[in-house]
Amino acid sequence: MKISILDASTISMSDLSWDTIHKLGNCEIFPSTSADQIYKKCKDTDIIIANKVAFGSDILNKLPKLKLICVTATGVNQIDLKAAKELNIKVSNVPNYSTYSVSQMVFAHILNFTQHVSEHSTLIKKGEWQKRDSFCFWNSTLLELSNLNLGILGFGNIGKTVANIGKSFGMNILIHTRHPKEKEFPFYQFVELEDLFKRSDFISLHCPLTNKTDKIINDRLLKLMKKTAFLINTSRGGLIDEQALSNVLNNNLIKGAGLDVLSTEPPKENNPLLKSKNTTITPHIAWATLEARQRVLNETAKNIESFLKEEDRNIVI
């Protein structure tokens, strides 16, 4: 059984071992793969492991030996599932591997805005503290999270974990979701979308990118936010109208934005958020803790083992 790993660098930067995959077949590892390289690398492949490499119907039809695509992520929108099903190619994913990692990044961005840790460290290294007469100084207003409103859009596993962490900080939790669960979570407030944007001090996005949610964070909703509020996105960049967000940031209509994802990754030079005021951007790393990546490898190996035993495990189609 030939196994081709097409973008290994998205999982391991030499800090994890692929031994569990090697044991399952004749394994070939590529750090990255462009669209025009897929056929050459996979024409004799039985199982493909990939993270972001896209498979449309055109390339799937050129790979007659292909039996399984293992996506090393939860989302599978880069795979033409209809074509895969017609060709009897199974697709597996790895659900819930990064719940704690992503939730952690949400609060890394939030705390960056409230505590200004890196800002003050930089000032000290420039000699600012040494110039002061007092034992302490602060260059920006520091905020407590207690009693602030944390709005969560989307209430899956990550949204729930973010809510729990926010609650432990003493925050008031506001949630908008398609299927409110007031009886299960009586200590949270389930609100309409407009209320979420009007009332929240921080808004954290945790919904999938679909036709309905594409650019759901638009000019109208952004202008409902408080001028002191912050927007956090560790979900999908396409949820946000980036020009609209840039406009409200540059016009001081909201306080700031913490983003781990953008609509195009890596971003193009003309992305308006790259030069927006009070914007912190990280390079899509919320999911990428060592533990989460190890979990992906372990779960992918189990998915392949089950497939080889003719058992379905995390099979999307």
Image (cartoon, grey):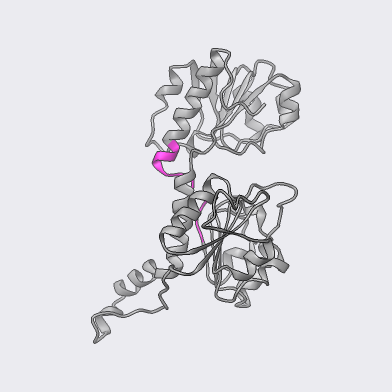
Q: Nearer the viewer, residue 166 or 100?
A: 166
Task: Note whether 285 is above or below 309 in the view shown.
Answer: below
The answer to if 187 sits in the magenta stretch is no
Q: Position of residue 42 (x, y in %)?
A: 61, 22
Q: Which residues are magenta?
A: 281-293
Q: Is residue 287 left or right of residue 239?
A: left
Residue that lies at the very extreme toward the bottom in this rendered image: 133
Task: Note whether 225 is above or below 1 in the view shown.
Answer: below
Task: Note whether 223 is above or below 151 in the view shown.
Answer: below
Q: Nearer the viewer, residue 170 or 100?
A: 170
Q: Quadrant of the N terminus?
A: top right
At a point 71% along the width and 52% down the height, the residue shown is 213
Q: Is residue 153 left or right of residue 168?
A: right
Q: Nearer the viewer, residue 240 or 229?
A: 229
Q: Position of residue 2 (x, y in %)?
A: 54, 16
Q: Quadrant of the C terminus?
A: top right
Q: Position of residue 211 (x, y in %)?
A: 75, 48
At a point 66% along the width and 68% down the height, the residue shown is 222
At a point 63% along the width and 18% down the height, the residue shown is 67
- Can residue 316 be seen in the rendering of this structure? yes
At a point 66% along the width and 53% down the height, the residue shown is 238
- Can residue 263 be seen in the rendering of this structure? no
